[in-house]
Amino acid sequence: MSLDDPTRSVNAWPMSSINKTEIKVGYQVFLKDGGDEVGAVRDLSLDRPEIVVYVENGGEFKVPLSAIHAVHFQKVILDPGHLPEDMRVALRRAHDAETL
């Protein structure tokens, strides 16, 4: 699912049943399983249902647990449809500084 896809649904997956105890600081963050890494978990909010993710070339963003599709093998897979707009913009530029 593309971040720019006008047909994407903001309710692509049901409300997350992710438990924050499954996530650790330093886990890599992806938009799809098998896709490119777009960032890393920077912090876990103790009093809110969210995590803080650092996006390459974009900074830190608060991500609600409802935006997490899966957690496995030290990876956090996000649902782009549940992410804040400013984070989606930053994710489009996550690898802009890389050269071939």
Image: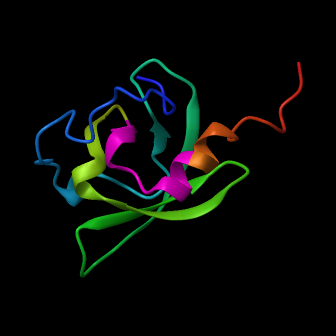
| 27 versus 43 height, above or below | above
* Residue 44 image offset from top left, x and y in percent: 36, 68
Residue under the point 27% across and 41% down: 10
Number of numbered discs overlaid on the protein picture:
0
View extreme (right): residue? 99
Task: Judge by depth and name the residue closer to the eye, 91 or 26.
Answer: 91
Q: Quadrant of residue 81?
A: top left
Quadrant in the picture for the C terminus = top right
Task: Judge by depth and name the residue closer to the eye, 24 or 10.
Answer: 10
View extreme (bottom): residue? 47
Task: Judge by depth and name the residue closer to the eye, 3 or 34.
Answer: 3
Residue 12 visible, this angle: yes
* Residue 97 image offset from top left, x and y in percent: 84, 39
Residue 78 visible, this angle: no
* Residue 40 image offset from top left, x and y in percent: 53, 49
* Residue 3 image offset from top left, x and y in percent: 49, 33
Q: Which residues are magenta?
A: 74-88
| 74 versus 7 height, above or below | below
| 34 versus 39 height, above or below | above
Residue under the point 68% across and 55% down: 58
Q: Quadrant of residue 13?
A: top left
Quadrant in the picture for the N terminus = top left
Taking the magenta stretch, the answer to whether it contains residue 27 is no
| 87 versus 72 height, above or below | below
> In the picture provided, is 20 more to the left or to the right than 93?
left
Residue under the point 42% across and 29% down: 6
Residue under the point 50% across and 21% down: 35
